[in-house]
Amino acid sequence: MIKRTRLIKRSIALPLFCLLMEGWGYAQSPVLQTMIQEEFDRLKGIVITPEVKLQFDTKPGKSSSSLRKSGTVVINIPQLQRIISQAGIQFDLPIVRLLLAHELAHQEQYRVYPVPLHTLLGECQADVIAGYFLFVLSNSDFFKAKTALKVNSASDPLIRPYFESLNNQTFALYSAIFNIGDNYSVENTHPRSFERRMAFRDGYTYGLLSLAEQNAGDPAVSSNVRQSALVLIKKYKKTLNVFSDDTRFSWSLRQAGKIVHTQLSNCRDIVVSNKWEYHTNSDNPYVSYTQNIRNTGDRTVTVNYLNYVYERLATDPENSLYWTTLNAEPLSVTLHPGESKVMTGRLNWPPVPMLPLYVPIGSTNSLYSCSCLGDNEARQTVGSDDMASETPTKKLSGANAFYILVSQRKALQDIIAGVGQPSSTDQNMITFESKLQYPEAKTTEVRKNVSTGQYSFFATLYKGADAGGAQHAVKKMLADLAELETPITPVRGPIPGWTIKDQHGVNIGYIGNMEVDDMDRYIVVLCIYNK
Protein backbone atom coordinates (compact mmCIF):
# COMPACT_ATOMS: atom_id res chain seq x y z
CA MET A 1 0.00 0.00 0.00
CA ILE A 2 1.65 3.12 -0.91
CA LYS A 3 0.19 6.00 -2.66
CA ARG A 4 -2.66 7.80 -1.21
CA THR A 5 -3.67 11.36 -1.66
CA ARG A 6 -5.81 13.54 0.51
CA LEU A 7 -8.76 12.12 -1.40
CA ILE A 8 -8.28 8.83 0.38
CA LYS A 9 -8.87 10.52 3.69
CA ARG A 10 -11.26 13.23 2.58
CA SER A 11 -13.10 12.21 -0.55
CA ILE A 12 -14.22 8.63 0.03
CA ALA A 13 -17.17 7.82 2.22
CA LEU A 14 -18.11 4.53 3.79
CA PRO A 15 -21.49 2.99 4.63
CA LEU A 16 -23.44 5.19 7.02
CA PHE A 17 -25.36 2.34 8.56
CA CYS A 18 -22.15 1.09 10.20
CA LEU A 19 -22.76 3.65 12.92
CA LEU A 20 -26.13 2.10 13.67
CA MET A 21 -24.58 -1.32 14.22
CA GLU A 22 -22.31 -0.37 17.11
CA GLY A 23 -23.05 -2.48 20.13
CA TRP A 24 -25.14 -4.99 18.16
CA GLY A 25 -24.03 -8.56 18.76
CA TYR A 26 -24.57 -11.75 16.83
CA ALA A 27 -26.52 -14.36 18.74
CA GLN A 28 -26.72 -16.70 15.76
CA SER A 29 -24.46 -17.23 12.76
CA PRO A 30 -27.32 -16.85 10.22
CA VAL A 31 -27.35 -13.10 10.92
CA LEU A 32 -23.66 -12.89 10.04
CA GLN A 33 -24.10 -15.19 7.06
CA THR A 34 -26.75 -12.87 5.64
CA MET A 35 -24.32 -9.94 5.76
CA ILE A 36 -21.57 -12.04 4.16
CA GLN A 37 -23.89 -13.15 1.35
CA GLU A 38 -25.02 -9.56 0.64
CA GLU A 39 -21.44 -8.26 0.49
CA PHE A 40 -20.31 -11.25 -1.55
CA ASP A 41 -23.04 -10.52 -4.12
CA ARG A 42 -21.92 -6.88 -4.34
CA LEU A 43 -18.27 -7.83 -4.81
CA LYS A 44 -19.14 -10.36 -7.51
CA GLY A 45 -20.19 -7.42 -9.66
CA ILE A 46 -16.63 -6.09 -9.52
CA VAL A 47 -14.49 -9.20 -9.99
CA ILE A 48 -13.88 -10.85 -13.35
CA THR A 49 -15.19 -14.19 -12.06
CA PRO A 50 -18.92 -13.67 -11.35
CA GLU A 51 -19.48 -17.43 -11.43
CA VAL A 52 -17.50 -17.88 -8.20
CA LYS A 53 -19.45 -19.54 -5.38
CA LEU A 54 -19.72 -18.83 -1.65
CA GLN A 55 -19.67 -21.54 0.99
CA PHE A 56 -19.84 -21.39 4.78
CA ASP A 57 -17.78 -23.50 7.15
CA THR A 58 -18.84 -23.81 10.80
CA LYS A 59 -16.01 -26.04 12.06
CA PRO A 60 -14.03 -24.47 14.94
CA GLY A 61 -10.29 -24.11 14.51
CA LYS A 62 -10.40 -23.78 10.72
CA SER A 63 -9.61 -20.81 8.44
CA SER A 64 -11.34 -19.17 5.52
CA SER A 65 -9.93 -20.07 2.12
CA SER A 66 -10.25 -19.69 -1.64
CA LEU A 67 -10.40 -22.94 -3.61
CA ARG A 68 -8.98 -23.06 -7.12
CA LYS A 69 -10.58 -26.17 -8.62
CA SER A 70 -14.17 -25.55 -7.52
CA GLY A 71 -14.10 -21.74 -7.81
CA THR A 72 -15.38 -21.39 -4.25
CA VAL A 73 -14.72 -18.91 -1.44
CA VAL A 74 -15.10 -20.65 1.92
CA ILE A 75 -15.74 -18.43 4.95
CA ASN A 76 -15.17 -19.99 8.35
CA ILE A 77 -17.86 -18.52 10.63
CA PRO A 78 -16.28 -19.30 14.06
CA GLN A 79 -13.03 -17.68 13.03
CA LEU A 80 -14.79 -14.62 11.63
CA GLN A 81 -16.92 -14.27 14.77
CA ARG A 82 -13.77 -14.39 16.88
CA ILE A 83 -12.09 -11.67 14.82
CA ILE A 84 -15.18 -9.44 15.02
CA SER A 85 -15.42 -10.00 18.76
CA GLN A 86 -11.77 -9.01 19.24
CA ALA A 87 -11.94 -5.95 17.01
CA GLY A 88 -15.35 -4.70 18.15
CA ILE A 89 -18.80 -5.29 16.74
CA GLN A 90 -18.83 -1.84 15.09
CA PHE A 91 -16.18 -3.18 12.70
CA ASP A 92 -18.18 -6.18 11.49
CA LEU A 93 -18.92 -4.87 8.00
CA PRO A 94 -15.35 -3.72 7.19
CA ILE A 95 -13.95 -7.05 8.44
CA VAL A 96 -16.37 -9.02 6.27
CA ARG A 97 -15.52 -6.88 3.24
CA LEU A 98 -11.79 -7.16 3.77
CA LEU A 99 -11.91 -10.93 4.13
CA LEU A 100 -14.15 -11.42 1.08
CA ALA A 101 -12.10 -9.01 -1.05
CA HIS A 102 -8.87 -10.89 -0.30
CA GLU A 103 -10.34 -14.31 -1.04
CA LEU A 104 -12.08 -13.11 -4.22
CA ALA A 105 -8.79 -11.63 -5.35
CA HIS A 106 -7.39 -15.16 -5.24
CA GLN A 107 -10.23 -16.27 -7.50
CA GLU A 108 -9.21 -13.63 -10.03
CA GLN A 109 -5.65 -14.92 -9.88
CA TYR A 110 -6.81 -18.46 -10.55
CA ARG A 111 -8.57 -17.33 -13.75
CA VAL A 112 -5.75 -15.08 -15.01
CA TYR A 113 -2.71 -17.25 -14.20
CA PRO A 114 -2.90 -20.89 -15.36
CA VAL A 115 0.39 -21.57 -13.57
CA PRO A 116 0.21 -20.84 -9.82
CA LEU A 117 2.15 -17.84 -8.59
CA HIS A 118 4.86 -18.01 -5.97
CA THR A 119 3.01 -18.02 -2.64
CA LEU A 120 4.44 -14.79 -1.18
CA LEU A 121 3.98 -12.88 -4.44
CA GLY A 122 0.46 -14.24 -4.91
CA GLU A 123 -0.63 -13.28 -1.39
CA CYS A 124 0.74 -9.78 -1.81
CA GLN A 125 -0.98 -9.29 -5.17
CA ALA A 126 -4.25 -10.49 -3.58
CA ASP A 127 -3.91 -7.73 -0.99
CA VAL A 128 -3.33 -5.15 -3.74
CA ILE A 129 -6.40 -6.29 -5.67
CA ALA A 130 -8.44 -6.39 -2.44
CA GLY A 131 -7.61 -2.73 -1.86
CA TYR A 132 -8.99 -1.91 -5.30
CA PHE A 133 -12.19 -3.87 -4.61
CA LEU A 134 -12.74 -2.03 -1.35
CA PHE A 135 -12.27 1.35 -3.00
CA VAL A 136 -15.00 0.49 -5.49
CA LEU A 137 -17.39 -0.49 -2.68
CA SER A 138 -16.53 2.60 -0.61
CA ASN A 139 -17.02 4.89 -3.58
CA SER A 140 -20.40 3.30 -4.29
CA ASP A 141 -21.45 3.81 -0.66
CA PHE A 142 -20.34 7.42 -0.82
CA PHE A 143 -22.60 8.22 -3.73
CA LYS A 144 -25.51 6.41 -2.07
CA ALA A 145 -25.00 8.50 1.06
CA LYS A 146 -24.81 11.71 -0.96
CA THR A 147 -28.09 10.85 -2.67
CA ALA A 148 -29.83 9.96 0.58
CA LEU A 149 -28.72 13.17 2.28
CA LYS A 150 -29.15 15.29 -0.86
CA VAL A 151 -25.63 16.74 -0.72
CA ASN A 152 -23.08 17.28 -3.50
CA SER A 153 -19.72 16.57 -1.89
CA ALA A 154 -17.96 15.02 1.09
CA SER A 155 -17.12 18.52 2.37
CA ASP A 156 -20.79 19.38 2.88
CA PRO A 157 -21.36 20.05 6.63
CA LEU A 158 -24.33 17.67 6.64
CA ILE A 159 -22.34 14.59 5.61
CA ARG A 160 -18.85 15.44 6.79
CA PRO A 161 -19.19 14.27 10.44
CA TYR A 162 -20.46 10.86 9.32
CA PHE A 163 -17.86 10.65 6.60
CA GLU A 164 -14.88 11.52 8.83
CA SER A 165 -15.94 9.14 11.60
CA LEU A 166 -16.54 6.17 9.30
CA ASN A 167 -13.43 6.82 7.25
CA ASN A 168 -11.18 6.95 10.29
CA GLN A 169 -12.81 3.91 11.92
CA THR A 170 -12.49 1.82 8.81
CA PHE A 171 -8.91 2.73 7.99
CA ALA A 172 -7.90 2.18 11.60
CA LEU A 173 -9.52 -1.25 11.39
CA TYR A 174 -7.77 -2.15 8.13
CA SER A 175 -4.47 -1.11 9.68
CA ALA A 176 -5.11 -3.32 12.70
CA ILE A 177 -6.19 -6.31 10.59
CA PHE A 178 -3.06 -6.00 8.46
CA ASN A 179 -0.94 -6.23 11.57
CA ILE A 180 -1.51 -9.95 11.06
CA GLY A 181 1.24 -11.22 8.80
CA ASP A 182 4.17 -13.61 8.80
CA ASN A 183 6.23 -11.35 11.05
CA TYR A 184 7.42 -14.26 13.17
CA SER A 185 7.97 -16.83 10.45
CA VAL A 186 11.21 -17.64 8.69
CA GLU A 187 9.35 -19.07 5.71
CA ASN A 188 7.07 -16.04 5.17
CA THR A 189 4.29 -17.47 2.99
CA HIS A 190 2.32 -14.27 3.62
CA PRO A 191 3.65 -10.69 3.49
CA ARG A 192 4.64 -9.03 6.71
CA SER A 193 2.26 -6.57 8.36
CA PHE A 194 3.69 -3.35 6.92
CA GLU A 195 3.88 -4.97 3.47
CA ARG A 196 0.18 -5.85 3.67
CA ARG A 197 -0.67 -2.25 4.52
CA MET A 198 1.41 -1.06 1.59
CA ALA A 199 -0.32 -3.50 -0.77
CA PHE A 200 -3.83 -2.59 0.38
CA ARG A 201 -3.04 1.13 0.22
CA ASP A 202 -1.70 0.86 -3.34
CA GLY A 203 -4.74 -1.07 -4.51
CA TYR A 204 -7.06 1.46 -2.90
CA THR A 205 -5.30 4.32 -4.67
CA TYR A 206 -5.43 2.41 -7.97
CA GLY A 207 -9.19 2.64 -7.54
CA LEU A 208 -8.84 6.42 -7.39
CA LEU A 209 -6.91 6.29 -10.67
CA SER A 210 -9.66 4.19 -12.27
CA LEU A 211 -12.31 6.67 -11.08
CA ALA A 212 -10.32 9.60 -12.48
CA GLU A 213 -10.02 7.80 -15.83
CA GLN A 214 -13.79 7.27 -15.89
CA ASN A 215 -14.42 10.94 -15.19
CA ALA A 216 -11.91 12.05 -17.84
CA GLY A 217 -13.72 10.03 -20.50
CA ASP A 218 -17.29 10.85 -19.44
CA PRO A 219 -18.86 13.53 -21.69
CA ALA A 220 -21.70 13.91 -19.18
CA VAL A 221 -19.46 15.52 -16.54
CA SER A 222 -18.36 19.14 -16.68
CA SER A 223 -15.17 20.23 -18.42
CA ASN A 224 -13.72 21.31 -15.05
CA VAL A 225 -14.23 17.80 -13.65
CA ARG A 226 -12.62 16.23 -16.71
CA GLN A 227 -9.66 18.60 -16.48
CA SER A 228 -9.19 17.84 -12.77
CA ALA A 229 -9.38 14.13 -13.58
CA LEU A 230 -6.57 14.45 -16.14
CA VAL A 231 -4.35 16.09 -13.51
CA LEU A 232 -5.10 13.27 -11.07
CA ILE A 233 -4.43 10.61 -13.70
CA LYS A 234 -0.96 12.02 -14.32
CA LYS A 235 -0.24 12.13 -10.59
CA TYR A 236 -1.51 8.64 -9.81
CA LYS A 237 0.25 7.01 -12.76
CA LYS A 238 3.53 8.47 -11.56
CA THR A 239 3.12 7.64 -7.89
CA LEU A 240 1.83 4.14 -8.62
CA ASN A 241 4.29 3.56 -11.47
CA VAL A 242 1.48 2.56 -13.88
CA PHE A 243 2.45 2.07 -17.54
CA SER A 244 0.25 3.05 -20.47
CA ASP A 245 -0.45 -0.58 -21.47
CA ASP A 246 -0.98 -1.89 -17.93
CA THR A 247 -4.00 -3.89 -16.86
CA ARG A 248 -5.05 -4.28 -13.24
CA PHE A 249 -3.21 -7.61 -13.20
CA SER A 250 0.05 -6.62 -14.87
CA TRP A 251 0.35 -3.56 -12.64
CA SER A 252 -0.67 -5.27 -9.38
CA LEU A 253 1.75 -8.17 -9.98
CA ARG A 254 4.64 -5.81 -10.68
CA GLN A 255 3.74 -3.70 -7.65
CA ALA A 256 3.46 -6.79 -5.43
CA GLY A 257 6.91 -7.83 -6.63
CA LYS A 258 8.36 -4.56 -5.40
CA ILE A 259 6.53 -4.70 -2.10
CA VAL A 260 7.92 -8.14 -1.21
CA HIS A 261 11.24 -7.31 -2.89
CA THR A 262 11.39 -10.21 -5.33
CA GLN A 263 13.72 -11.81 -5.87
CA LEU A 264 15.53 -11.75 -2.55
CA SER A 265 18.37 -13.91 -3.86
CA ASN A 266 19.21 -11.08 -6.27
CA CYS A 267 18.44 -8.17 -3.95
CA ARG A 268 20.84 -9.33 -1.27
CA ASP A 269 23.75 -8.79 -3.69
CA ILE A 270 22.89 -5.08 -3.81
CA VAL A 271 24.32 -2.59 -1.30
CA VAL A 272 22.99 0.96 -1.18
CA SER A 273 24.38 4.04 0.56
CA ASN A 274 21.70 6.72 0.96
CA LYS A 275 22.26 10.39 1.71
CA TRP A 276 19.56 13.03 1.60
CA GLU A 277 18.79 16.54 2.79
CA TYR A 278 15.51 18.35 3.33
CA HIS A 279 15.18 21.85 1.86
CA THR A 280 12.21 23.54 3.50
CA ASN A 281 11.96 26.81 1.62
CA SER A 282 8.36 27.88 2.16
CA ASP A 283 7.77 28.56 -1.55
CA ASN A 284 9.41 25.45 -3.04
CA PRO A 285 10.30 22.73 -0.49
CA TYR A 286 12.13 19.63 -1.72
CA VAL A 287 14.41 16.80 -0.69
CA SER A 288 17.69 16.18 -2.54
CA TYR A 289 19.18 12.68 -2.53
CA THR A 290 22.32 10.80 -3.53
CA GLN A 291 22.35 7.01 -3.75
CA ASN A 292 25.43 4.87 -4.35
CA ILE A 293 24.19 1.48 -5.54
CA ARG A 294 26.73 -1.37 -5.71
CA ASN A 295 26.45 -4.95 -7.00
CA THR A 296 28.51 -7.25 -4.77
CA GLY A 297 27.42 -10.46 -6.49
CA ASP A 298 28.64 -12.36 -9.55
CA ARG A 299 25.58 -11.72 -11.78
CA THR A 300 24.31 -8.68 -13.65
CA VAL A 301 21.38 -7.28 -11.66
CA THR A 302 18.69 -4.77 -12.63
CA VAL A 303 17.17 -2.86 -9.72
CA ASN A 304 13.81 -1.17 -10.26
CA TYR A 305 12.77 1.07 -7.41
CA LEU A 306 10.85 4.17 -6.38
CA ASN A 307 11.83 7.08 -4.15
CA TYR A 308 8.96 8.65 -2.18
CA VAL A 309 8.06 11.69 -0.18
CA TYR A 310 5.11 11.07 2.14
CA GLU A 311 3.04 13.27 4.41
CA ARG A 312 2.11 11.65 7.72
CA LEU A 313 -0.72 12.28 10.14
CA ALA A 314 0.55 14.46 12.97
CA THR A 315 -1.60 12.52 15.43
CA ASP A 316 -0.48 9.08 14.22
CA PRO A 317 2.77 9.42 12.25
CA GLU A 318 3.66 5.71 12.31
CA ASN A 319 0.39 4.54 10.75
CA SER A 320 1.60 3.98 7.20
CA LEU A 321 -1.93 3.29 6.00
CA TYR A 322 -2.69 7.00 6.37
CA TRP A 323 0.43 8.29 4.65
CA THR A 324 -0.23 10.64 1.74
CA THR A 325 2.12 10.50 -1.23
CA LEU A 326 3.33 13.97 -2.12
CA ASN A 327 5.77 12.86 -4.83
CA ALA A 328 7.39 9.72 -6.21
CA GLU A 329 10.06 8.93 -8.79
CA PRO A 330 10.47 5.53 -10.48
CA LEU A 331 14.11 4.66 -11.20
CA SER A 332 15.99 1.74 -12.76
CA VAL A 333 19.67 0.83 -12.74
CA THR A 334 21.52 -2.18 -14.21
CA LEU A 335 24.78 -3.19 -12.54
CA HIS A 336 27.39 -5.69 -13.70
CA PRO A 337 29.30 -7.73 -11.08
CA GLY A 338 31.28 -5.38 -8.84
CA GLU A 339 29.88 -2.28 -10.55
CA SER A 340 28.65 0.82 -8.69
CA LYS A 341 26.52 3.70 -9.88
CA VAL A 342 25.52 6.97 -8.25
CA MET A 343 21.92 8.19 -8.61
CA THR A 344 21.07 11.78 -7.70
CA GLY A 345 17.90 13.81 -7.88
CA ARG A 346 15.30 15.81 -6.02
CA LEU A 347 11.65 15.42 -5.13
CA ASN A 348 9.50 18.49 -4.66
CA TRP A 349 6.34 18.68 -2.59
CA PRO A 350 3.73 21.38 -2.00
CA PRO A 351 4.16 23.43 1.19
CA VAL A 352 2.61 21.52 4.10
CA PRO A 353 2.40 22.19 7.85
CA MET A 354 4.84 19.43 8.79
CA LEU A 355 8.03 18.01 7.36
CA PRO A 356 7.26 15.14 4.96
CA LEU A 357 8.93 11.75 5.22
CA TYR A 358 11.43 10.71 2.54
CA VAL A 359 11.64 6.93 1.95
CA PRO A 360 14.75 5.86 -0.01
CA ILE A 361 15.55 2.44 -1.43
CA GLY A 362 16.50 -0.09 1.23
CA SER A 363 14.50 1.37 4.09
CA THR A 364 11.29 -0.05 5.55
CA ASN A 365 8.26 0.87 3.42
CA SER A 366 10.41 1.36 0.31
CA LEU A 367 9.54 -0.42 -2.93
CA TYR A 368 12.03 -2.19 -5.18
CA SER A 369 12.65 -5.40 -7.07
CA CYS A 370 15.81 -7.05 -8.38
CA SER A 371 16.07 -9.22 -11.47
CA CYS A 372 18.73 -11.05 -13.47
CA LEU A 373 18.69 -12.28 -17.04
CA GLY A 374 17.52 -15.86 -17.15
CA ASP A 375 15.71 -15.75 -13.82
CA ASN A 376 13.34 -18.68 -13.42
CA GLU A 377 11.56 -18.27 -10.12
CA ALA A 378 10.47 -21.48 -8.43
CA ARG A 379 6.69 -21.69 -8.50
CA GLN A 380 4.52 -22.65 -5.60
CA THR A 381 0.77 -22.92 -5.17
CA VAL A 382 -0.93 -19.62 -4.39
CA GLY A 383 -1.77 -19.72 -0.70
CA SER A 384 -5.44 -19.91 0.24
CA ASP A 385 -5.20 -19.26 3.97
CA ASP A 386 -7.34 -16.50 5.36
CA MET A 387 -5.26 -13.39 6.04
CA ALA A 388 -6.21 -13.55 9.70
CA SER A 389 -5.50 -17.22 10.33
CA GLU A 390 -3.51 -17.85 13.47
CA THR A 391 -0.96 -20.62 13.09
CA PRO A 392 1.93 -21.46 15.41
CA THR A 393 4.49 -20.10 12.91
CA LYS A 394 2.89 -16.66 13.08
CA LYS A 395 2.62 -16.36 16.85
CA LEU A 396 6.00 -17.52 18.11
CA SER A 397 7.16 -17.37 21.69
CA GLY A 398 10.73 -16.38 22.36
CA ALA A 399 11.70 -20.00 23.00
CA ASN A 400 10.50 -21.55 19.76
CA ALA A 401 11.55 -18.47 17.78
CA PHE A 402 15.04 -19.01 19.14
CA TYR A 403 14.85 -22.69 18.22
CA ILE A 404 13.89 -21.82 14.62
CA LEU A 405 16.60 -19.19 14.47
CA VAL A 406 19.33 -21.57 15.61
CA SER A 407 18.11 -24.29 13.26
CA GLN A 408 18.50 -21.77 10.41
CA ARG A 409 21.73 -20.20 11.58
CA LYS A 410 24.00 -21.75 8.94
CA ALA A 411 21.83 -20.11 6.26
CA LEU A 412 21.15 -16.71 7.81
CA GLN A 413 21.57 -15.13 4.37
CA ASP A 414 18.30 -16.83 3.43
CA ILE A 415 16.28 -14.73 5.89
CA ILE A 416 17.50 -11.47 4.36
CA ALA A 417 14.71 -9.16 3.21
CA GLY A 418 15.91 -6.71 0.59
CA VAL A 419 19.09 -4.79 -0.09
CA GLY A 420 21.98 -4.11 2.26
CA GLN A 421 23.23 -0.85 3.68
CA PRO A 422 26.73 -0.12 5.05
CA SER A 423 27.00 0.59 8.75
CA SER A 424 27.51 4.27 9.49
CA THR A 425 30.37 3.40 11.84
CA ASP A 426 31.91 0.45 10.00
CA GLN A 427 31.84 0.32 6.20
CA ASN A 428 33.04 -3.29 6.40
CA MET A 429 29.73 -4.26 8.04
CA ILE A 430 26.65 -4.50 5.79
CA THR A 431 23.23 -4.61 7.45
CA PHE A 432 20.09 -6.13 5.91
CA GLU A 433 16.50 -6.12 7.05
CA SER A 434 15.50 -9.53 8.45
CA LYS A 435 12.47 -11.52 7.35
CA LEU A 436 12.35 -12.97 10.86
CA GLN A 437 10.89 -10.41 13.26
CA TYR A 438 11.90 -11.79 16.65
CA PRO A 439 9.06 -11.59 19.24
CA GLU A 440 9.12 -8.38 21.31
CA ALA A 441 12.34 -7.22 19.63
CA LYS A 442 12.61 -3.52 18.80
CA THR A 443 14.59 -4.20 15.61
CA THR A 444 15.96 -7.25 13.82
CA GLU A 445 18.56 -7.39 11.09
CA VAL A 446 21.08 -9.65 9.40
CA ARG A 447 24.67 -8.41 9.31
CA LYS A 448 27.43 -9.44 6.93
CA ASN A 449 31.11 -8.94 7.65
CA VAL A 450 32.58 -8.23 4.21
CA SER A 451 36.11 -9.29 5.22
CA THR A 452 35.20 -12.66 6.71
CA GLY A 453 31.98 -13.35 4.82
CA GLN A 454 30.33 -14.18 8.16
CA TYR A 455 26.63 -13.48 8.67
CA SER A 456 24.94 -12.84 12.02
CA PHE A 457 21.38 -12.28 13.20
CA PHE A 458 21.08 -9.23 15.45
CA ALA A 459 17.97 -8.38 17.49
CA THR A 460 17.57 -5.42 19.85
CA LEU A 461 15.49 -6.80 22.71
CA TYR A 462 15.41 -3.59 24.73
CA LYS A 463 16.48 0.01 24.27
CA GLY A 464 15.63 2.74 26.75
CA ALA A 465 16.36 4.41 30.09
CA ASP A 466 14.62 1.87 32.33
CA ALA A 467 17.17 -0.38 34.00
CA GLY A 468 14.35 -2.60 35.22
CA GLY A 469 13.03 -3.00 31.68
CA ALA A 470 16.48 -4.01 30.48
CA GLN A 471 16.82 -6.56 33.29
CA HIS A 472 13.36 -7.97 32.46
CA ALA A 473 14.37 -8.45 28.81
CA VAL A 474 17.52 -10.28 29.89
CA LYS A 475 15.62 -12.53 32.31
CA LYS A 476 13.06 -13.35 29.64
CA MET A 477 15.78 -14.33 27.16
CA LEU A 478 17.60 -16.45 29.76
CA ALA A 479 14.32 -18.17 30.65
CA ASP A 480 13.71 -18.98 26.98
CA LEU A 481 17.18 -20.49 26.73
CA ALA A 482 16.68 -22.48 29.92
CA GLU A 483 13.42 -23.89 28.50
CA LEU A 484 15.40 -25.20 25.54
CA GLU A 485 18.27 -26.36 27.78
CA THR A 486 20.68 -24.17 25.80
CA PRO A 487 24.13 -23.83 27.43
CA ILE A 488 25.16 -20.28 28.32
CA THR A 489 28.31 -18.87 29.96
CA PRO A 490 28.52 -15.48 31.73
CA VAL A 491 31.02 -13.05 30.25
CA ARG A 492 32.83 -10.77 32.68
CA GLY A 493 34.14 -7.37 31.72
CA PRO A 494 32.96 -3.83 31.02
CA ILE A 495 30.01 -5.18 28.97
CA PRO A 496 28.15 -7.89 30.89
CA GLY A 497 26.62 -10.64 28.86
CA TRP A 498 26.32 -14.35 28.19
CA THR A 499 27.89 -16.55 25.55
CA ILE A 500 25.43 -18.97 23.91
CA LYS A 501 26.72 -22.45 22.99
CA ASP A 502 25.33 -25.34 20.98
CA GLN A 503 25.11 -28.94 22.18
CA HIS A 504 28.75 -29.47 21.19
CA GLY A 505 29.99 -26.53 23.26
CA VAL A 506 30.65 -24.30 20.24
CA ASN A 507 29.94 -20.58 20.63
CA ILE A 508 27.01 -19.64 18.39
CA GLY A 509 26.06 -16.24 19.78
CA TYR A 510 25.70 -13.96 22.78
CA ILE A 511 23.35 -11.83 24.82
CA GLY A 512 24.62 -8.37 25.70
CA ASN A 513 23.30 -5.97 28.35
CA MET A 514 24.96 -2.59 27.99
CA GLU A 515 24.70 0.84 29.53
CA VAL A 516 25.08 3.33 26.69
CA ASP A 517 27.38 6.36 26.93
CA ASP A 518 27.00 6.69 30.70
CA MET A 519 23.64 8.37 30.10
CA ASP A 520 21.48 5.92 32.04
CA ARG A 521 20.33 4.35 28.78
CA TYR A 522 20.40 0.62 28.29
CA ILE A 523 20.41 -1.77 25.35
CA VAL A 524 19.89 -5.53 25.38
CA VAL A 525 20.86 -7.43 22.24
CA LEU A 526 20.76 -11.00 20.96
CA CYS A 527 23.30 -12.06 18.34
CA ILE A 528 23.54 -15.43 16.55
CA TYR A 529 26.44 -16.35 14.24
CA ASN A 530 26.11 -18.46 11.11
CA LYS A 531 29.44 -20.25 11.67
Image: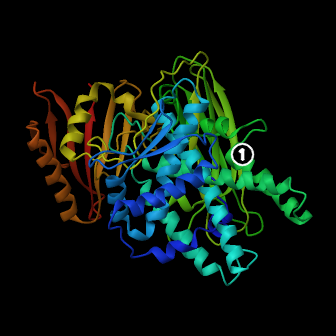
For label 1, the crowd category at 10 Å Cα-Cα, with few meaning under 14, some 14 to 19 and many 20 or more, is few
158 vs 439, left or right, is right
Residue 436 figure quarter: top left
Residue plotted at (62% across, 44% down): 47
Residue 91 figure quarter: bottom left
398 vs 342, left or right, is left
Q: Is residue 82 above or below residue 303?
A: below
Q: Is residue 314 visible?
A: no
The image position of residue 14, as x and y in percent, is: 59, 67
- Label 1: which secondary element: strand
The image position of residue 330, as x and y in percent, is: 69, 41
Residue plotted at (43% across, 49% down): 193
The image position of residue 290, as x and y in percent, is: 64, 43
Question: Which colour style is shown?
Answer: rainbow
Front residue of 138/360: it is: 138
What residue would you read off at disc 1? 345
Front residue of 421/121: it is: 121
Identity of the amino acid at label 1?
Gly
225 vs 487, left or right, is right
The image position of residue 520, as x and y in percent, is: 26, 65
Q: Is residue 279 above or below residue 481?
A: below
Q: Quadrant of the C terminus?
A: top left
Residue plotted at (31% across, 54% down): 78
